[in-house]
Image: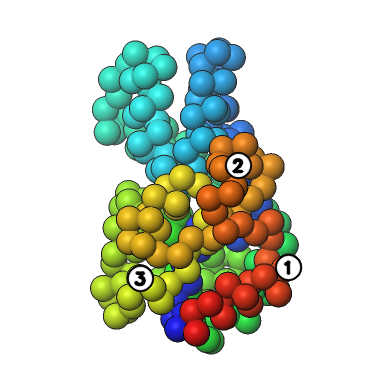
Amino acid sequence: MLKGIIFDFDGVIAESVQIKTEAFAALYAPYGPDIIKKVVDHHEANGGMSRFKKIKLYHKSYLNKIITDREITELANQFSKMVINKVIASPYVPGALEFIQSSYKKYKLFISSGTPTDEMNKILIARKISGYFTEVYGSPELKKDHVADICKKNNLQSYEIIFFGDAIEDIEAAAYHEVQFILRIHKFNNSYYDLSHHTIIDNFHDTKKLQSIINDFK
């Protein structure tokens, strides 16, 4: 029986993926178009990885610079200032809000995001949806650790959970714990995955398909 649902946020609940892409491009704009392209390509292919890890990686791999933790934090704070209000204002993935509102009294709902936890909480509060979620998880912890903590704290088994995500980090976290994964496909990720290997949704308006997925747990 289904007891818990885990959602990534960007690209799953909100149409905010491009906001993060544009912010990374702006952050690395001083280094020229070649570096911007490398950063954007990696970012788009590795959704769900925390911005802290990405900044460290981009400086080392693309700029040949070793960056201190303090410098990473400063750049991450710049990134946050660029994105937070835009993410708060971004539209919902079609049907996502309605699905959350119809599900939260039946199941325990969780957020597992690569966004820092405190920032994620601010976004949910500003969007007036924080009350729907039992707990919110973000970086710096890994998503596979989010899932482990969700199961432990809420006495949930992996076969009692669905994970809705759109990124490789989501896929790997679900696979690690043998949690059923539903891939939300959109124009920014549809070229990165073999869709025949996943159960996919375009949005949450396909209530018949969603109900069929949920019924499989009974």
Mark yes or no: residue 54 visible. yes
Q: Position of residue 106 (x, y in %)?
A: 52, 86
The first of marks 3 and 1 along the sequence is: 3
Q: Between tags 3 and 2, which lies in front?
A: 3
Taking the spot 57% from the left edge, 80% from the top edge, the residue there is: 215
| Residue 158, numbered label | 3
Q: Quadrant of the N terminus?
A: bottom left
| Residue 130, numbered label | none
Q: Quadrant of residue 22?
A: top right
User: Helix, strand, or loop for circle 2?
Assistant: loop
The reply to whether dot 3 and dot 1 touch (C-beta < 8 Å) is no
Residue labelled with disc 2: 189
Amino acid identity at mark 1: His
The first of marks 1 and 2 along the sequence is: 2
User: Helix, strand, or loop for circle 1?
Assistant: loop
Relative to residue 172, is residue 147 depicted above or below?
below
Q: Between tags 3 and 1, which lies in front?
A: 3
- How much space separates mark 3 and mark 1, taking CA atoms? 26 Å
Q: Position of residue 44 (x, y in %)?
A: 55, 35
- How much space separates mark 3 and mark 2, taking CA atoms? 26 Å
